[in-house]
Image: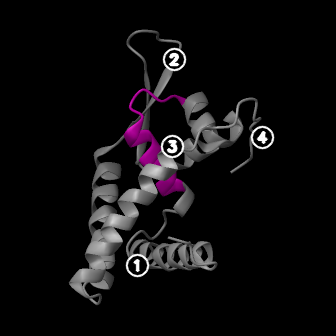
């Protein structure tokens, strides 16, 4: 089957619409926490052994930028810096209970916002979308990182 010429544009438009739905769900309730800070919290949650250097790698920023982000999150009571029990020279980033609650509530709000959009779609189209998203995810996972590709660290 031949691919329609505007498929990539349609996916881009759908991704923009999804981002809009997710951002709207987040912006209503996360006063004082920027999208970048939410991303940092999510990375810390999913990388429990992360230190500032690892966080900088994950964000593709210089360590000083990651450290400043952590300073702000620590001042907000969302992150703690704790000495690693295996190597006290290392400092781990630990999300607080407040951060865990914030991220859980955000995830719930985003799911509700996406579900509200899906509820406006016919069941058959929802099923087709599910199959297409699974196939897209699988194809994206097969994309290999180019050997020798250099990453340029950015500031946040």
Does the stretch in magenta take in 155?
Answer: no
**Residue identifier under label 1:** 28
User: Mark 4 — residue?
Assistant: 152
Q: CA distance from mark 2 to mark 1?
A: 37 Å
Residue at the spot 61% in from the left edge and 29% down from the top edge: 53
Mark 3 / mark 2, whichever is N-terminal:
2
Locate residue 19, reporting x and y percent: 50, 73
Residue 110 position, x and y percent, is: 34, 70
Q: Is residue 40 magenta?
A: yes
Q: Is residue 133 left or right of residue 53?
A: left
Q: What SS does tag 3 mark?
A: loop
Q: Which residue in the structure is indicated by mark 2?
A: 90
Cβ atoms under marks 3 and 2 closer than 8 Å: no
How far apart, in angstroms, are the residues tagged by discs 2 and 4?
25 Å
Q: Is residue 145 visible?
A: yes
Q: Position of residue 7 (x, y in %)?
A: 57, 75
Is residue 119 shown left or right of residue 79? left
Q: Which residues are magenta?
A: 37-51
């Amino acid at each position: 089957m031949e691919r329609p010429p505007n498929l990539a544009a349609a996916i881009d438009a759908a991704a923009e619409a999804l981002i809009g739905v997710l951002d709207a769900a987040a912006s209503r309730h996360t006063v004082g926490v920027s999208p970048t800070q939410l991303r940092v919290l999510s990375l810390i949650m999913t990388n429990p052994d992360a230190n500032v250097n690892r966080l900088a790698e994950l964000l593709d920023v210089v360590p000083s930028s990651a450290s400043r982000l952590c300073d702000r999150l620590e001042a907000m009571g969302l992150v703690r810096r704790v000495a690693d029990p295996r190597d006290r020279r290392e400092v781990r980033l630990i999300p607080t209970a407040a951060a865990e609650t914030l991220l859980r509530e955000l995830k719930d709000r985003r799911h509700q916002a996406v579900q509200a959009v899906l509820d406006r779609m016919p069941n058959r189209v929802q099923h087709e979308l599910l199959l297409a998203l699974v196939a897209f995810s699988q194809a994206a996972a097969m994309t290999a990182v180019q050997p020798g590709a250099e990453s340029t660290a950015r500031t946040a």
